[in-house]
């Protein structure tokens, strides 16, 4: 019987931290979601010096996927140390697949390492609707792990971040306006981008989505939140947004309204 999936572990030889900053973590996520076959990814989490990835690709594709992720991370994260040979283990039953899924997403708890939301170095951000980069993989999770439901993911999120109340992840508990000072950071996190690396065109599109994420906020408030002029905010409000990105930005704002002050910082492209 062929394997249902593969559990990939990539680890640096010198045991240095793989993605120490928010920018590194966003680049790491982009390295994974930008590779061919990424939509068959079920879960990933980078913790400390290593990365866990669970994929439903076949073995040959999984080997290539692991190689491509490591090569991309080495370049994009500016890593000095090489990776150890990737460890790739077969997942041979549905029960094993579900266990591996939760094992990957619970990595910070296993290593007693902090994992502050919005979980930039994990597919949990995409599963919770906080980021759009990995939106396609949610269909794979629904297909292969239909028993995984949002309430379970929310419980895990609050377990990983015990200081954050459950309503922070619940858009039905509106508090997004209070996160307005972090509109620029919420926009960048929702899109999984590093603001300093954005082209003018992409930055403009993100601002359009951000302006429409808070339609009840006056333009001066949007401008202040994005760190742009009133006229730039007005142009953004007139644009046609990506609705999924606007929704992810609203979720980010909702979350950041509940985060401790040191966990949120404002930045905008």
Image: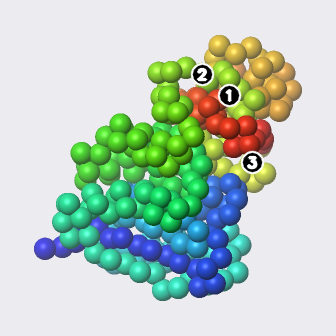
Which x, y percent locates residue 132? 52, 43
Visible residue check, residue 174: yes
The mark found on residue 195 in the picture is: 3
Sequence-wise, which precedes: disc 1 or disc 3? 1
Residue tagged 1: 179
Q: CA distance from mark 1 to mark 3?
A: 18 Å
Looking at the image, is mark 2 or mark 3 nearer the viewer? Answer: 2
Q: CA distance from mark 2 to mark 1?
A: 7 Å
Residue tagged 2: 175
Label 2 close to label 1 by CB (< 8 Å): yes
Left or right of residue 60, residue 231 in this image = right
Q: In the rendered view, how is the structure colored?
A: rainbow
Which residue occupies 39% across, 51% down? 137
Left or right of residue 94, residue 195 in this image = right
The mark found on residue 131 in the picture is: none
Left or right of residue 80, residue 173 in this image = left
Q: From the viewer's side, name the closer residue of 247 and 10.
A: 10
Q: Residues within 10 Å of mark 1 (few under 14, many from 20)?
A: many
Q: Quadrant of residue 87?
A: bottom left
Sequence-wise, which precedes: disc 2 or disc 3? 2
Q: Quadrant of residue 70?
A: bottom right
Visible residue check, residue 44: no
Q: Is 89 located above or below residue 156 in the figure?
A: below
Q: Quadrant of residue 210?
A: top right
Which residue occupies 68% across, 23% down? 178
Left or right of residue 23, residue 108 in this image = left
Locate the N terminus and report the quarter of the image it occupies: bottom left
Locate the C terminus and report the quarter of the image it occupies: top right
Q: CA distance from mark 2 to mark 3?
A: 25 Å
């Amino acid at each position: 019987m062929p394997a249902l999936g593969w559990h990939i572990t990539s680890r640096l030889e010198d045991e240095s931290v793989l993605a120490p900053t928010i920018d590194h973590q966003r680049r790491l996520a982009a390295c994974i979601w930008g590779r061919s076959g990424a939509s068959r990814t079920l879960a990933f989490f980078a913790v400390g010096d290593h990365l866990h990835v669970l994929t439903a690709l076949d073995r040959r594709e999984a080997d290539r996927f692991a190689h491509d992720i490591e090569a991309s991370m080495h370049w994009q994260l500016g890593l000095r140390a090489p990776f150890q040979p990737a460890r790739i283990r077969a997942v041979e039953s549905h029960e094993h697949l579900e266990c591996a899924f939760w094992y990957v997403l619970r990595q910070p708890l296993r290593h007693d390492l902090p994992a502050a939301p919005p979980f930039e170095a994990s597919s949990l951000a995409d599963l919770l609707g906080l980021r759009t980069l990995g939106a396609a993989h949610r269909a794979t999770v629904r297909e292969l792990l239909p028993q995984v439901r949002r309430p379970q993911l929310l419980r895990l999120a609050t377990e990983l971040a015990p200081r954050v109340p459950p309503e922070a992840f619940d858009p039905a508990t509106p508090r997004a306006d209070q996160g307005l000072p972090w509109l620029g950071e919420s926009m960048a996190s929702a899109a999984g981008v590093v603001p300093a690396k954005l082209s003018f065109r992409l930055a403009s599109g993100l601002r359009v989505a951000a302006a429409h994420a808070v339609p009840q906020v006056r333009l001066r408030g949007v401008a202040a939140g994005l760190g742009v002029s009133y006229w730039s905010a007005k142009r953004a409000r007139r644009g046609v947004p990506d609705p999924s990105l606007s929704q992810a930005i609203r979720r980010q704002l909702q979350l950041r309204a509940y985060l401790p002050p040191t966990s949120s910082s404002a930045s905008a492209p």
